[in-house]
Amino acid sequence: MDWLAGAMTWSGDTNPPGRGALVSDLLSLSLACVGEPRQMPLCRLVYASLRGPRSPSDLVKILETSEARNAVEAITGALVLTPDHYLQLLEGERRVVDACYQRICRDPRHSYVGLILFELIDERLFPDWSMSAVDLSEGDGMAPYTEGKEFRPEELPRAVIEQLFRDVAARLRRR
């Protein structure tokens, strides 16, 4: 199945019906196993949501809470802030990442949550960061990824999303 073809997108004034259900539905189909429990494969999930009015201190609190919880759950990833959106990559065991995504979808601080990418992976892009944030909302931070157009995460090609997060990982390593 092409995960991008099945990714949720949004439009209009309301959240899409059943938001957050896609990963759970697919997960329930793929987790049926017989025999001894085994290490779950890793996955990578990218979602976007609209960025609402938040003070810098609110964002710091959210990041601190996320970092602590993600460390306990062995979730790694990064949050990219754009002028109008949050774009977040989460990596970890499928069940744990799915549970995290479900919490995000139910969180009233997020609006218009849309699944952008979901894939199984062999290794993490962000192995050392339970939660890092990069602010690309100022200046032309998103220009290399939008070709001069308005940033619409649901329309970005998979290759552009992957390059964006590889660039974010490289930037974080240089810190």
Image (tube, rainbow, N blue to C red):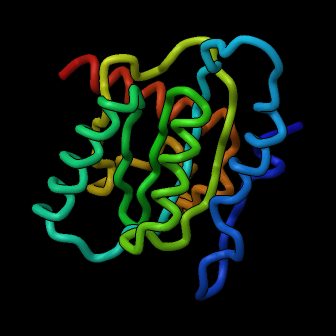
Classify residue 83 by image quadrant: bottom left
Q: Residue at x 58, y 31 (%)?
A: 44
Q: Kindly give the residue lying farthest to the right in the view shown.
A: 1
Q: Position of residue 45 (x, y in %)?
A: 58, 39
Query: Does 21 sit above or below residue 37?
Result: below
Left or right of residue 16: residue 142:
left
**Where does the image place residue 120, in percent across and percent down from the top left?**
68, 25
Instruction: Identify the residue at horizontal 83%, vertical 19% (top origin).
Output: 34
In the depicted structure, whether residue 51 falls above or below residue 138: below
Q: Quadrant of the N terminus?
A: top right
| Residue 149 figure quarter | bottom right
The residue located at (47%, 57%) in the rendering is: 103
Q: Residue at x 49, y 18 (%)?
A: 124
Residue at the outermost front position: 35
The reply, left or right, for residue 129 in relation to residue 126 is left
Q: Is residue 64 above or below residue 121?
A: below
Residue furthest bottom as drawn? 13
